[in-house]
Image (tube, grey):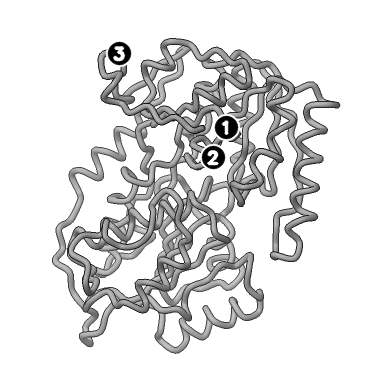
């Protein structure tokens, strides 16, 4: 049974994670301070407004599939828009009243809900311009987006993840409307942004914070001195694999990695999970790993987690998480997450960029690097099952316990 330990019970020895320094690794980097200063100084309080013709800004939402981590990102962006007065929802006096759980959210269903309820004079969503690209016909998605741009039904594209960014920016080559790429592990490596600071494209803004993955792996190594860490991923950029390799080299550890095809349609689900489990078993049985990082967007259905991760539990191999607190909170899930993406603290930065765009600024001229302060979650029961002793200093600096 899941046990949730509330923070107030252990305030005497828990400190907020603001700056963490282990083994010479400074988690809160100079870049993070620069972004924070920029955000605080430059944040604008532009009053909500319509387009010049009096109509609302129409947002097209493009995501990969129902993934709780991206759903949470979307939730807090929308909450920020609501709190700043850009959205009004009939019958809702506070955004927390929407019938969705931020921690376990189907993003497309939330967009459909808002499209049906209405969101006031300034911003609008539609069921038509709301896509899960891994679950829908590729031709229909491409045609729908291009027609929406051509017909004036899209004023801004909000792309959640690397693949939606690649689809809209690279594959479709859209330049007529602004594109915001959010919850993308490494937009620079994905060739979506020219630099970490600016996209280099007039109509594109990407949130960037990829350097935190170096710190994340170092943090996990401080918690457990592994020598050979396993990773299975479908995209090097989504998995931040180059960043992890740099970190591993500096730590003097090895990464045993496997790349497999992603889940592209529901009818491939059984074959996909069979291949994924086999890859996990190979890392343990044939490649001698002593730790494992569960990479982004690999286990899409939490009900499959016990079966997928059983080989690690059976061999006392700790499972760390790249992204997604739901993967730690779940029984038989991961042991620990040092969050590289904080849905709450990043949302104001993203919404500030969106408001600037609505105010007429070019997305490519808006600063895009914001590294959130680390947020550490630990599942103590999962750690116990893996016979992993978590150092006291890690416990003291953690924010949430399951």
**Residue nearest the viewer, comparing 4 with 285:** 4
Residue 137: where, in percent of width, then height?
66, 76
Q: Which residue is mark 1?
A: 334
Residue 67: where, in percent of width, then height?
53, 54
Measuring 68% from the left and 26% from the top, which residue is drawn there? 313
* Mark pair 1, 3: CA separation: 24 Å
Who comes first in sequence, dot 2 or dot 3? Answer: 3
Task: Tell me where residue 140 sits by quadrant.
Answer: bottom right
Q: Vertically, is 203 above or below 305?
A: below
Who comes first in sequence, dot 2 or dot 1? Answer: 2
**Residue nearest the viewer, comparing 218 with 171:** 218
| Residue 209 falls left or right of residue 84 | right
Count neighbours of disc 3 (C-alpha within 10 A) and say few if under 14, some if 14 to 19, many if 20 or more: few
Check contact, mark 2 vs mark 1: CB within 8 A.
yes
Q: Vertically, is 353 above or below 323?
A: below
| Residue 110 falls left or right of residue 356 | right
Check contact, mark 2 vs mark 3: CB within 8 A.
no
Instruction: Identify the mark at residue 327; answer none if there is no mark.
Output: 2
Q: Which residue is mark 3?
A: 13
Count neighbours of disc 1 (C-alpha within 10 A) and say few if under 14, some if 14 to 19, many if 20 or more: many
Measuring 62% from the left and 15% from the top, which residue is drawn there? 387
Identify the secondary structure beneath mark 3.
loop
Who comes first in sequence, dot 1 or dot 3? Answer: 3
Task: Tell me where residue 97 sits by quadrant.
Answer: bottom left
Q: Vertically, is 375 above or below 370?
A: above
* Mark pair 2, 1: CA separation: 6 Å
Residue 104: where, in percent of width, then height?
46, 51
| Residue 108 falls left or right of residue 286 | left
Identify the secondary structure beneath mark 2.
helix
Identify the secondary structure beneath mark 1.
loop
């Amino acid at each position: 049974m899941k046990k949730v330990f509330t923070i107030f019970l252990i305030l005497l020895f828990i400190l907020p994670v603001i700056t963490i320094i282990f083994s010479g690794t400074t988690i809160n980097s100079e870049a993070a301070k620069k972004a924070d200063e920029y955000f605080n100084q430059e944040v604008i309080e532009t009053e909500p407004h319509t387009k010049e013709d009096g109509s609302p800004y129409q947002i097209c939402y493009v995501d990969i599939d129902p993934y709780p981590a991206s759903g949470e990102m979307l939730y807090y962006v929308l909450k920020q828009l609501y709190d700043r007065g850009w959205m009004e929802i009939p019958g809702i006096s506070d955004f927390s009243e929407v019938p969705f759980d931020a921690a376990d959210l189907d993003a497309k269903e939330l967009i459909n809900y808002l499209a049906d309820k209405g969101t006031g004079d300034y911003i609008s969503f539609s069921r038509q311009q709301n896509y899960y690209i891994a679950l829908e016909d590729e031709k229909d998605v491409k045609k729908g987006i291009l027609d929406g741009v051509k017909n004036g039904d899209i004023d801004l594209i909000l792309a959640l993840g690397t693949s939606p960014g690649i689809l809209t920016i690279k594959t479709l080559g859209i330049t007529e409307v602004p594109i915001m790429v959010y919850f993308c592990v490494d937009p620079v490596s994905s060739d979506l942004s020219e630099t970490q600071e600016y996209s280099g494209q007039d109509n594109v803004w990407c949130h960037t914070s990829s350097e935190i993955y170096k710190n994340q792996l170092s943090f996990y190594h401080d918690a457990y001195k592994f020598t050979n860490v396993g990773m299975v991923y479908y995209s090097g950029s989504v998995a931040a694999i180059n960043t992890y390799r740099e970190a591993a080299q500096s730590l003097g550890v090895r990464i045993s990695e496997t790349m497999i095809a992603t889940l592209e349609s529901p009818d491939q689900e059984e074959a996909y999970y069979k291949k994924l489990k086999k890859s996990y078993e190979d890392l343990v049985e044939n490649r001698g790993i002593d730790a494992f990082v569960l990479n982004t967007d690999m286990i899409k259905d939490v009900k499959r987690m016990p079966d997928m991760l059983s080989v690690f539990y059976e061999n006392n191999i700790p499972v760390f998480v790249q992204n997604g607190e739901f993967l730690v909170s779940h029984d038989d899930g991961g042991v620990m997450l040092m969050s590289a993406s904080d849905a709450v603290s990043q949302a104001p930065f993203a919404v500030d960029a969106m408001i600037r765009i609505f105010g007429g600024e070019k997305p490519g001229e808006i600063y895009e690097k914001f590294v959130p302060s680390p947020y550490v979650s630990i599942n103590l029961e999962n750690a116990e099952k893996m016979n992993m002793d978590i150092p006291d200093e890690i416990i003291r600096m953690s924010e949430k316990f399951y």
